[in-house]
Amino acid sequence: MARQPLGFGQERPPVRLWLVPAASVVAGSLLAIGPYVANVPLMPPFGLLVLIGWRLLRPEIWGAWVALPLGLIDDLIGGAPLGSAMAIWTIVMLGFDIVDHRMLWRDFATDWGLAMLALAFATSAAWAIALFTGGAGPYWTVVGQMLLSALAFPMVARICRAIDIWRRGERGRTA
Amino acid sequence: MAPPRHRGRGFSRRIQYGLFVGYVVAIVGIVAGLGLVLVARFDPVAFQGIRGLALDLTSPATAVFGNVGRGADEIGGGLSSYLDAARQNRALRAELEATANRLIQARATEYENARLKRLLHVVERGTQPIVVARLIGSDAANHRRTVTLAAGTSDGVRAGQPVRGPGGLVGRVAEAGARVARVLLVSDGGSSVPVRVARTGQPALVAGKGDGTVEIKSTQLGAPPLHRGDLLFTSGTGGVFPAGVPVAVVLSVSGDLATGRPLAEPARLDVAMVLPEVELAPPPAAPVGSAN
């Protein structure tokens, strides 16, 4: 993939270039709260899924530190102990940075596999933190969440791609 | 496709410093995050202010769809009861016969109870609810079992207060914003409620398992075994929960451990009542002057 200069959509307000991805991650976090009462945490962590989607699509827009504020917002929205998503998401982002320097070849399948690894780590770590700070369910609930996350990732990656095209005002030029 | 290069790491000092600072910030942030988790471990009600604010800000997202969710929920319930009608009919008939007997017994007990209370001049502690509000939603990705309640500190709701629904005990307020509060359910992995078995009167502890069910541990050695269908209600031991609120029903028993289901089904997004926290009576004053 050739890197497009970010000044491609020059006529757009530049604030949209960084605000849109961040807003989409927050929107992902908001997706988990809804008018239902879940007995088992089956919903994938959509905030993290969207963040990973952006990280794999456009590594250059963010440093690993961006996971700190976004994770904090996710903690506040979801009611997890403050700092849990902050730490977990940032570790995931650093992990992607390390992988980026090692891997020579990449396609969608490897991206999906990497996302799966990251999500397996993140959901397990969130479960462990919940257990540490008071109590969590049995571990099988995490496995269900992981499987659903795996199924949801391709969709999230497509949505990120669509948002990216709109964000950079490329509609009609690339698609 | 070759991997997109992660920031051109060229010879530019400025870019290299920028990258380095980014990593330092990220690692300091991870340490800070883990520190915050430690704080949450030892002080669960820390950062109540900012968490309550976030709860208030995100509540419209759930409240807007409240009616839709309720409708969908009821459609699901209606379909399954239609498919299950014949079996349900038989079960209900049997239950009706059993309850008719129980009702007569209960009336007799009630009468006796009223008489005994008059006799003893027992003054019931005021259990006026603080507020009655609707349960509006939850976070389906969270590992703690919580539910949001459409009432907050402006209605007098405080962290720690017990919450009950029409069916039974829902849980305890974990944190409260100005207009919305988060309630930790009885089925949460960190919840435990002292109860009494309705049939035998033996004390037990209902501990959440985190998957919608609860575990019942007997706190008495050599207690008579629990049976499937045993009802459990709060004993009021240790304060916090008022006595006599139904909590759970036993589903299966294996040895000393029994599994049950909470009686309040918050999954139906029903109304709930916040009750004042029951305070323990102060310990009796030490006797003045020893008897020697």
Image (tube, rainbow, N blue to C red):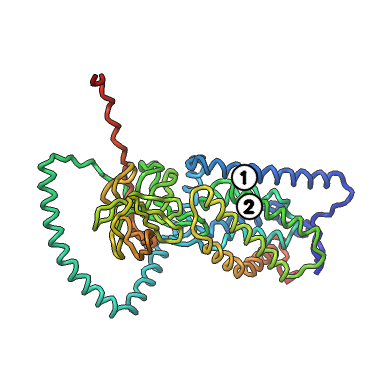
Q: Residue furthest front?
A: B292
| Residue at mark 1 to residue at mark 2: CA–CA distance | 9 Å
Q: Is residue B125 above or below residue B291?
A: below
What residue did someone put label 1 on? Answer: B33
Q: Residues within 10 Å of mark 2 (few under 14, many from 20)?
A: many
- In the figure, is residue A146 to the left or right of B133? right
- In the figure, is residue B93 to the left or right of B183? left
Residues at discs 1 and 2 in contact (Cβ within 8 Å): yes
| Three-letter code, disc 1 | Gly
- Across and down, in percent, residue B43 comes to 50, 40
- Across and down, in percent, residue B259 comes to 38, 61
Do the residues at pointers 1 and 2 share their chain? no
- Across and down, in percent, residue B53 comes to 49, 44
Dot 2 falls on a residue whose secondary structure is helix
Chain for disc number 1: B
- Asked if one can make out residue B101 in the rendered structure from this viewpoint, the answer is yes
Q: Quadrant of the N terminus of chain B?
A: bottom right
Return the residue nearer the eye: A35 or B260. B260
Q: Which mark, by number, is residue A88? A: 2
- Asked if one can make out residue B166 in the rendered structure from this viewpoint, the answer is no
